C-alpha cells in the first residue's frame, strides 16, 4: 500500500490581492475535500504575513493528487490566482 | 477557546548534511508528541529535494508552542542543526 502524499502549496498574493486570492482558494476547499483519496485540504494564513497562504494537503497517493489537478475547480483556481500571486508547490513524504 | 496554531518549520540541510539533520530531528519527534497541547509533529521530506525537510506541527495554542521551545530536547535540536541547515519557521492559523 503506497504511503500518503503530502502537499504544501505556498501562495504569496501580490500587494492588495490577499482577499481575492483567499476567496478564490476557499471556493475549492469543499469540492477538493470531497474528492476520492483526499485526506486533508486546509487553508492556512501566515501570522506574520497576511499575504502568505499555505494549502496543507494530504492525499492517499500520487494518483489521487493527479486526479485533483485535472478537476475543473482546481484548473479554475490556478487560472484565477496565477496572475495575482507567486505559487510554490512541494510534494513531500512522511519520513517519521 | 483559542484556535489551534499551525507551524511549518522548513529546514534545508547544507550539502552532504541531510542525514545528520534528519537524524537530529527524529530524536525530538517522540518527546515533542508527548508534550501537553501537541496535536501533530510530523517530519516530511521533499520529494524533489532530499535536503529539504518540513516539520509539520499543530499546537493547542501559542502557550503550548512556547513551552515546547523551552524544552531541553528542542533547544538541543536547534543547537545541533543550526550550523548544518537554513531554517525558516512560520506560524499560521487555520483560515478555512
Image: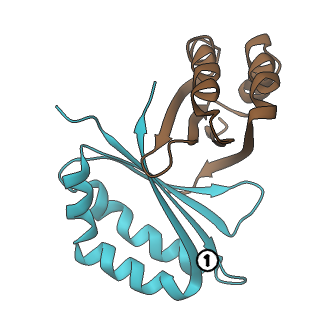
Chain colours: A brown, B cyan
Q: Which residue is disc 1 drawn over? A: B19
Q: Nearer the viewer, residue A86 or B3?
A: A86
- Number of disc labels: 1
Residue B71 in the image, given as x and y percentages of width and height: 22, 72
Direction from residue B49 to residue A38 in the image, left or right: left
What is the chain identity of the residue bearing mark 1? B
Which x, y percent locates residue B1?
Answer: 16, 31
In the picture, measured across the screen, residue A5 lies left or right of residue A43, that is: right
Identify the image quadrant of residue B61.
Answer: top left
Residue nearest the viewer, comparing A5 with A54: A54
Report whether B29 appears left or right of A81.
left
- Residue at 17% x, 52% y is B36
Q: Residue at x 32, y 73 (%)?
A: B74
Residue A94 at x, y percent in the picture: 57, 50
At 73% from the left and 29% from the top, the residue drawn is A65
Q: Quadrant of residue A95?
A: bottom right
On-image quarter of the N terminus of chain A: top right
Does B89 appear above or below A7? below
Mark 1, residues whose alpha carbon is within 10 Å: few (<14), some, or many (≥20)?
few
Q: Outermost residue, bottom direction?
A: B83
Quarter of the view holding residue A18:
top right
Vertical relation: A61 (above or below) A6 = above
Residue found 71% across the figure and 84% down from its top: B16
x, y percent for residue A66: 80, 27
Q: Is residue A87 above or below residue A24?
A: below
Label 1 element class? helix
Of A76 and A68, which appears nearest the observer?
A76
Amino acid at each position: 500500500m503506497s504511503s500518503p502524499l503530502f502537499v504544501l502549496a505556498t501562495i504569496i498574493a501580490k500587494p492588495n490581492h490577499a482577499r481575492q486570492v483567499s476567496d478564490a482558494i476557499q471556493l475549492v476547499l469543499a469540492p477538493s475535500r470531497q474528492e476520492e483519496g483526499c485526506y486533508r485540504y486546509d487553508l492556512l494564513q501566515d501570522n506574520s504575513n497576511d499575504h502568505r497562504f499555505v494549502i496543507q494537503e494530504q492525499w492517499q497517493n500520487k494518483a489521487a493528487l493527479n486526479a485533483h489537478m485535472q478537476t475543473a475547480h482546481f484548473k479554475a483556481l490556478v487560472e484565477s490566482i496565477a496572475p495575482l500571486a507567486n505559487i510554490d508547490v512541494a510534494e513531500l513524504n512522511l519520513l517519521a
